[in-house]
Structures are given as structure tokens and as C-alpha cells.
Amino acid sequence: MPQMNIPDAIAGLYRPDFRTNLHIDKIQGDASTRQYFRVTSPEGTAVACYDPAFEQTSKETYPFLVMQKLLADRGIPVPEVKTADPSTGLILLEDCGDLLLQNIFGSPMEREIPEIYRTIFDILAKLQSIRGKNDRIPFSLGFDREKLMFEFDFFIEHALYGYFEHLLEEKTITELRREFEAITKILVQPRHFVLNHRDFHSRNILLYQGKPVIIDFQDARMGLAQYDAVSLIRDSYVRLDDKLQEELKEYHFNSLRERGMTESGFDEYLHYFDIMAFQRNIKAVGTFCYQTMARKNNTFERSIAPSLAYLPEYFGRRSELKKAGRLLMPIIERVTA
């Protein structure tokens, strides 16, 4: 649908007597092709999402709607779906405001950060405990070798060959990819997989009426429990203080143990946390470089250096990452100097 027709299509979701009294404003979206609008009507406000992918599917198979129902039914705080129309690719959602978790850093709410994050980790443990049939999304999807290597290769293509072109020699990149393969083998452990949001960071959590609300959950899939914890604790958009980072790792681990979701010890949890964090941060850098170079979207460029700055800590603690770290150091030193 051409963009100029989207407001008309949004109006079509409302009663005829409301349509002349709508105020529709574009909202800055994420790194996807989805577009968002805040709609003010005589009934109040709502958020309209236009996703061209929704036009190619049905309500029953569209991942966002599948996940919204799954999470809402399990008591996970997510926006309510008011209506959905696959013929136009539009979904009308409850308006949960625009206060992102990211926005409270440097605000008067900053003193509440530890308690807010503990509440979010309570939600995460509840989300990760959800089970379902292996032949249904999201449980049929996982961080298998193909998915993890796709993300590593995306980094190679858009960061090493794109944004950082000529900084690493071809033979170094080939050697680095072999290390990525070895790291992937460590992380593919389906017997330990749980449900993950997949983009569980400070830009995908709203604070509405004082409580967290989870958004952008349509890419959920199975993986190690550390994946979502890494996304939140080693966030590319905000940096938690070191003490809180360590407290939250232990808090998450204890939540998993209390729910019977892991039999490992805390040292093993931390071991896989660091290796998963390496993969997650590398994946994020690939996305940011792609947005900067291919999409000409410079809003993500500022997050490249903070994401790379996390990596040396993992290299120092985990022998499995030392070689990859050595190969990546020319890039890390350049952007974090």
C-alpha cells in the first residue's frame, strides 16, 4: 500500500462517524519495515501498526498476533489488540504511551532503575517458562546453527565488508568466520532452550502507568535463557552500572532455578552468558552497520561503539573467545579509542 493511503486505511478501522474526527501522527519506528501511527479519536488514543508482511498472511499465522495472544493469555503485560485487518496490513493496538525504559536513564526516575529491572526480570522468567507444541510458532523456531551463523554472516557482510571495509584482511575474516562456527556449536543446545523474546532491550519495553509493558515480540523463538538476559543487561542503548549488572545475572539465575528451568550452577550460567553476549553484541553491530550503510539510517550508528566496547570483557574471561577477540581487536580499538 502506498504510504499516502495508510491514514485513509487507518480511518477505515473506525466507525464512519469517527472518521472525520481522527488525528493521525507518525511515530518513529524501529529498524524494521513496519510503520507506526498514534491515532486520536473521540474514544481516546490508539497505536496503528502497518506491516506489509501482514498483508501476505492471516490473523491465525501472523507471528505478532500469535505471540500477543500467547503472552496475554499467560499474564505477560503486552498491548491489547483492538482490531486487525490483514487486507490492509493494519493492526490497531492499545496506546501504552511512549515512555521507553531507555528514557528513564538520566531522568528523575533513575533511582528506581534497580527495582524496575527486577520487575522486568520477573516478567522475563514468566515468559521463558511458557511451553508449547514444537510444530507451532514460536516453539518451532530456534537459535540453531543456521540462525546463529546467519547473524554472524550478516555482521561479516555489513560490518566487516561494509562499515569497516578494508580494516581487516580477507584471510583474517576467513579465520574469524571459523571462530564464529566454533562459537555457534557451543550455543546450539536445544535441550536447554526456553522461549525468548529475541529483542528484549530498553527500546522494546514501555513503562505505562508505572509498570513495564513488553512490545515488538513478533520474532520470539527458542534459545538459551541467557539470550534475553544478555539483551537487557548488555544493552546497546544504555549501560547499567557494573554492580547492577552482576546483581541481575544472579537474580535471573535464581529465577530460573526457582522455576525448575535449569539444573546448572551459577558459574555455568555465567560461562554461557558471556558467550551468548558475544554473539548478541556482534549481531547488534551487524544490524547497526546495515542500517547505517544500506538503509542510510544514521540513528543507529551511535550504538556501534558501545556494543563493541562490551566485547573485551568476554575475551578476558572465556578462552573460547580469545582468538575471535584477537582478530577483532583492530576494529574494537579503532571505534572505542
Image: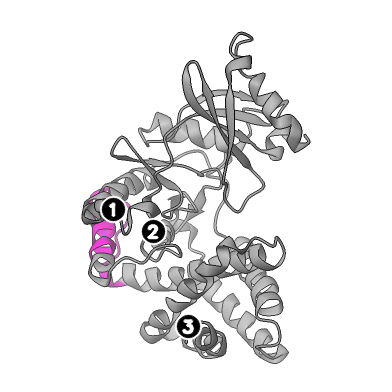
Q: Which mark is residue 117?
A: 1
Q: Is residue 236 magenta?
A: no
Q: Looking at the picture, tell me which residue is in the foreground, 198 or 11.
A: 11
Residue count near mark 1 (Cα–Cα under 10 Å), binned few <14, some 14–19, many ≥20: some
Q: Earlier in the sequence, mark 1 or mark 3?
A: 1
Q: Which residue is mark 3?
A: 336
Between circles 1 and 3, the one closer to the viewer is 3
Q: Is mark 1 in CB contact (under 8 Å) with mark 3? A: no
Quadrant where the N terminus sits is: top right
Q: Is mark 3 in CB contact (under 8 Å) with mark 2? A: no
Region in magenta: 247-267
Who's the residue at 35% across and 33% down the image? Answer: 75
Residue 1 in the figure: left or right of residue 129: right
Residue 247 in the figure: left or right of residue 144: left
Measured in 3D between alpha carbons, the distance from the residue under mark 1 to the one under mark 3, in whole angstroms, is 27 Å
Amino acid type, residue under disc 1 in the picture: Tyr
Measured in 3D between alpha carbons, the distance from the residue under mark 3 to the one under mark 2, in whole angstroms, is 21 Å
Measured in 3D between alpha carbons, the distance from the residue under mark 2 to the one under mark 1, in whole angstroms, is 9 Å
Between circles 3 and 2, the one closer to the viewer is 3
Q: Which residue is mark 2?
A: 232
Q: Is mark 2 in CB contact (under 8 Å) with mark 1? A: yes
Q: Judging from the image, what secondary structure is the residue with disc 2 in?
A: helix
Q: Position of residue 242 (x, y in %)?
A: 27, 72
Q: Can you say whether 39 is above or below 231 in the image?
A: above
Q: Earlier in the sequence, mark 3 or mark 2?
A: 2
Q: Judging from the image, what secondary structure is the residue with disc 1 in?
A: helix
Q: Judging from the image, what secondary structure is the residue with disc 3 in?
A: helix
